[in-house]
């Protein structure tokens, strides 16, 4: 399955950005949304590469960002936290595994 399909399977939307000419994936919640990019702020294309989660409030103000090990880490967090608030908290408090 392509990474785009994997993001869609998590419930993510995809949207192009005018400035960067890329597409970002995101999830909407009651009072915020999280977008997902690669480390360069571009469209994620490699499931084994780090994923950056950036959370914005409903006025589009940046709240926090977090680097996840890879797409599998994001998928595992979503599977373990069905409640949206629990998921948001889990992503915000995620720590990279020690190598």
Image (tube, rainbow, N blue to C red):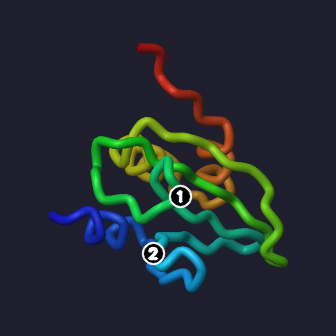
SS of the residue under disc 1: loop
Which residue position is annotated with label 1?
Answer: 41
x%, y% of residue 62?
78, 61
x%, y% of residue 86?
64, 50
Name the quarter where the N terminus is drawn: bottom left
SS of the residue under disc 2: loop
Closer-to-camera residue (65/19): 19
Q: Earlier in the sequence, mark 2 or mark 1?
A: 2
Q: CA distance from mark 2 to mark 1?
A: 9 Å
Above or below 98: residue 58: below
| Rendering quarter of residue 20 | bottom right
Residue sitting at 49 percent across and 47 percent down?
39
* Crowding at mark 2 (Cα within 10 Å: few <14, some 14-19, many 20+): some
x%, y% of residue 74?
44, 48
Residue sitting at 75 percent across and 50 percent down?
64
Closer-to-camera residue (73/16): 16
Left or right of residue 54, residue 50 in this image: left
Q: Which mark is residue 22?
A: 2
| Rendering quarter of residue 99 | top left
State if disc 1 and disc 2 touch (CB < 8 Å): yes
Residue sitting at 55 percent across and 41 percent down?
67
């Amino acid at each position: 399955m392509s990474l785009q399909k994997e993001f869609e399977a998590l419930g993510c939307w995809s949207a192009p950005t005018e400035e960067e000419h890329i597409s970002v994936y995101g999830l909407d919640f009651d009072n915020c949304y999280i977008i997902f990019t690669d480390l360069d702020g571009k469209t994620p294309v490699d499931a084994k590469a780090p994923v950056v989660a950036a959370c914005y409030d409903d006025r589009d103000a940046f709240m926090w960002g977090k680097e996840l090990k890879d797409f599998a880490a994001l998928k595992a967090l979503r599977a373990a936290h069905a409640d949206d608030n629990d998921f948001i908290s889990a992503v915000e408090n995620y720590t990279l595994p020690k190598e």
